[in-house]
Image (cartoon, helix red, strand yellow):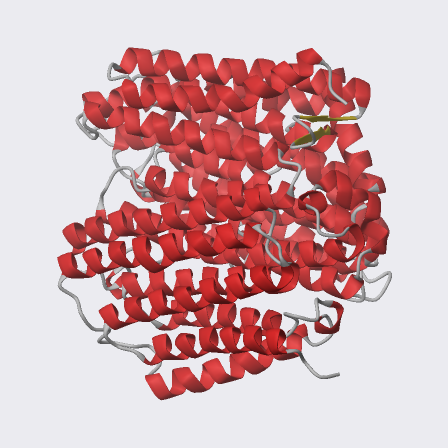
Amino acid sequence: MIPSIGSQLVDLGSALLLLTCFAIVAQRRLSACVDLFALQSVFLALTATLVAFLTGIHHIYIAAALTIVIKAIVIPRILKKVIERLNVSRELVMHINVPASLLICGMLVMVAFLITQPIIPLGHLLTRDSLAIALAIVLIGFFTMIARQKAVTQMIAFLVMENGLFLGATAATYGMPLVVELGVFFDVLVAALIAGIYTNRLQDAFDSVDTAHLSELKE
Amino acid sequence: MSDLPTTLAVTLLLLAPLVAGGLSLLLTSSRWLHVTNLTSIGTLVAAEVMIARSVLEQGSLTAFSEIVYIDALSSVILFIIGTVGLACSLYMRSYMDEQVARGVIAPKRLNLFFFLFHMFLMTMVVATVANSLGVQWVAIEATTLTTTFLIAFWRRRESLEAGWKYLILCSVGISLALFGVVLMYYSSLRVLGDVSSALNITQLQQVASQLDPHILKLAFVFLFVGYGTKVGLVPMHSWLPDAYTEAPAPVAAMLAGVLETVAVYAILRCRGIVDQAVPPDFTGGLLAIFGLVSFALAAFFILLQHNYKRLFAYSSIEHMGLAMVGFGIGGPIGNFGGLFHLVNHALAKSLAFFAAGNIHRRFKTVEITEIHGLTTVLPWSALALLIAGLALAALPPFALFASEMQILTALGSSGLPGEWTQPGTRFPIVVLLFCSLVAFGGLLYRITSMVWGVAPADIVSGEQWSVGHVPIILLGAVLVGFCWALPPPLQQLFEAASTLLVNR
């Protein structure tokens, strides 16, 4: 079976998303991480628009537009402001250094493909490979969360996970029901706002947003 | 199908906390904030009673063109939300006022507290009555967002740390659950076609047996890990002791009593669908093994605690683990035991946190070793602590003893589900008995050392009667009473709910 141009384009979009994931893992400068996240959200919106165009399902357009507004414009702005106010520009201490992290992420991608192997053939022809990539992005976000210490990086990792989930929803099911998608967007936006407030308060209380300092509550 | 009174009750159920939350933002006087709070929670409870009645008559009901779905199981969860919520509201009447009087919180921030409290209640109600698994997910993530500031409400370093940890861990966990929901939708679309109702429980239940088992298995693993983080199952529990220690006492009571229960409910809902396509041993095995591990580890952690709030936190993990074992084994006894255990734990744990809140306010410390002679310093709270402690240690005549016995009986008669153990092996039941002995000893040793002895000289003795004592007395009475006799409507409700879980 020859894959159609459409499905190849969707695959390309998903692959670009995965690529930005690796770039985020490799990037030490926080503001660059935010830019990369915004770029990833743009790729996500483009992929979703493509799927919407190819399938003719209209509510995906709404989700794509929301992705641009919330994840590519509003949330990056919030994060940039937080970074500015906090005077932290770099991730200084890492639990796992960049080359090792990239290697682990590569393995996570393989794991994702392995896990989704049995269920991929059941999916829509157009987007079936994106499901594996989506899971890979979720796992990489999960890993980044553990491996990085700055509150801002952890927040970006969480948002990357959300991007992965959104790609998964678009790929596997051509988007969740609209009400659910709106709810998810709302939750993500509020989560970003709350995290912004937290970094502020943590800064006041600890003079740092390095979560390694958050160790007073130990057994 | 729903008739007019039921629709009205459902509307009230959803609107009461929403309106009260909005009003709280506008109000400034503490008196009116409490009035709004009590009115709203009173309406909530009244609506729940009406809903429970019609559920008992009709079996299940849907409202607003199938957006809302309520059956006996969700009614039981609503019962827990209402009871613990009411108790917390009464307790807050004296607790919050004292905190304002002592200057711990600025009077201006009181309305923020009530706003978040109402939103917390609302998100939990939505998570319980939502027909769509997607909406349920959105609501459960929203509980994380509303509670994180409640946990960090004192704004001390430790509370900020606990709130941040809770936000990050639970958001991540719950993101994994969203992947599970996506997979669930993925499987149901293949049967139901691209309709937005394909995530509705009412729809999924009808076609569950035709869904693809591979996808469902994967979906359930993600859902279980995600919601399991919220339940506080080992190894995803590390946020829980910090959050319970730092949260204001009524919030800790809500987290321990209600939020965990709602998360368990979400797991049970998904399980009901997965089990029709996949052999039930798969989900049962996961639940029972994670439950047993949580139970065993938490029992030993109880021994190590020197902070009474952490003690109760680990006891929460222990009891949730035990309830999971009950649900995992399944069958009429296991499911009823698990459900009854959830209810009893919610009541006992909120009582425990109320007592802990009173003790903390008087002694200003959470160290067990610095607290002695509660019987003379705070006689009523001492009694409450003792009742809660004995109940949580699952001593007869408390209802937790009855439910723990039911779970043990189920384990003894059917063993752990799945291929985890050989049929007939006694190992799990020995582990369970031994660990409950450990937890029993640990809990009672700590609590008796607080209750008796000579009080430190610098602590004022005597306890003034306040509104906050009403829920303490009521919860204590109910805990003792439930072991002797369950009121017939409640018993019918629990039985209907566990029948739902058994038959699915």
Report x, y in % for residue A183.
50, 44
| Residue B233 seen anywhere in this rendered image of the structure | no
Count of numbered circles on the image:
0
Q: Residue at x 25, y 14 (%)?
A: B29
Report x, y in % for residue B8.
62, 14
Q: Residue at x 36, y 53 (%)?
A: A69
Looking at the image, is B9 positioned above or below residue B175? Answer: above
Q: Residue at x 80, y 18 (%)?
A: B57
Q: Nearer the viewer, residue B230 or B367?
A: B230
| Residue B99 seen anywhere in this rendered image of the structure | yes
Left or right: residue B53 compared with residue A29: right
Looking at the image, is B231 positioned above or below residue B119? Answer: below
Screen quadrant of the C terminus of chain B: top right
Displayed quadrant of residue A34: bottom left
Displayed quadrant of residue B488: top right
Screen quadrant of the N terminus of chain B: top right
Q: Nearer the viewer, residue A114 or B196?
A: B196
Report x, y in % for residue B61.
74, 25
Left or right: residue B404 compared with residue A97: right
Report x, y in % for residue B323.
66, 44
Looking at the image, is A152 positioned above or below residue B482? Answer: below
Left or right: residue B364 compared with residue A20: left
Looking at the image, is A33 positioned above or below residue B378? Answer: below
